Image: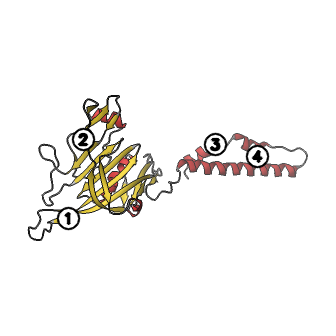
Amino acid sequence: MNVKLFSEAMSEVGDKYYEEAANYHCKKHGWVKWSVMAACLTAALFTVFFILSDYFRRQGAAPPDNPNGVIVDNPADNTDGDRTPTTSEIHVSMDNISFNEVWALTDAARIWRDPELYDYIQWDKNAVIEYYGKDLTPAYIPDGLTAAVGNGTASAIADKSGNIVEDTVWLGFYYDYYEDGSPKPTEGVSALKGFSVAVSKVGLLKDCVYVLPGNEVKTSDINETAVTFGYRSMSYGPYDPDTHEPSGYYDMYVAEFEYDGIEYQIVAAQMKAEEVVKVVSSIICGEEVIVDK
């Protein structure tokens, strides 16, 4: 405890306790006088102890008991005069993340909508932010990946009353692109490297089918948000004309969750599991997190 903190805490103790201890007088019996003074002093010391405990408790609250998203306080060391403000780190442990085996990714059937009954709306980035209430770009993007052209824009559909019936927004973050803006496969592995994010308030149009029945699929808790992670080993060509064996395999990860009234689906290829968890956590927590292996 340094002098400054002790002084601030002591200032919360009312002067009346010191006055009662120092100035209390009893005219009849001297021993009564000193007994009362001792009692008053004890009460004052007890009050100091109580306020000090409450004071320092308020200065640094204990982190929440949440093994999947623990906020760790790193108070500044002011012993050498450093006044750096207190910082916080959010940690997510891979030990608490469950990956379910993915069977396939399927697109839901598109509904044809009569242009006489529905309006097709082109949203720019500002319109998307206004509709969703925030920038949908994850706080963490792995090194080497860049945003696709047109990220954050979307084509929405509304009925004649103005109610939005389709609102999916897609964002892509890949290692390279063709001139037309579409992501380019890597040279060593004939597959994309990076991830996409699909978001919607009214319902996503792509489904992830897991090998296990729905009631057996496990979710992972990230900062009190249930996330369903999936994994599948994907093959890539060229394929052997005789054995039909692929040239090799790469990792594909899927993450599905709902946060702040928005549905999210993330599909990642040729990325590490820790990177996928870090992307998801940065969306939920609103900042870059630390993933503990």
Amino acid under label 1?
Tyr
Q: Earlier in the sequence, mark 1 or mark 2?
A: 2
Q: Earlier in the sequence, mark 3 or mark 2?
A: 3
Dot 4: element: helix
Residue for badge 1? 249
Image-quadrant location for residue 119:
top left
Q: CB atoms at circles 3 and 1 under 8 Å apart?
A: no
Amino acid under label 2?
Asn
- Residue 13 in view in this figure: yes
Q: Earlier in the sequence, mark 4 or mark 3?
A: 3
Q: Residues within 10 Å of mark 1 (few under 14, many from 20)?
A: some
84 lies left or right of 24: left
Residue for badge 2? 151
Q: CB atoms at circles 3 and 2 under 8 Å apart?
A: no
Residue for badge 4? 21
Q: Residue at x 33, y 37 (%)?
A: 165
Tell me the distance, in whole angstroms, between the alpha carbons under discs 3 and 2.
54 Å
Expressed as whole percent of the image width and height from the top left, the position of residue 126 reads 29, 33
Q: Earlier in the sequence, mark 1 or mark 4?
A: 4
- Residue 288 in view in this figure: no
Dot 1: element: strand
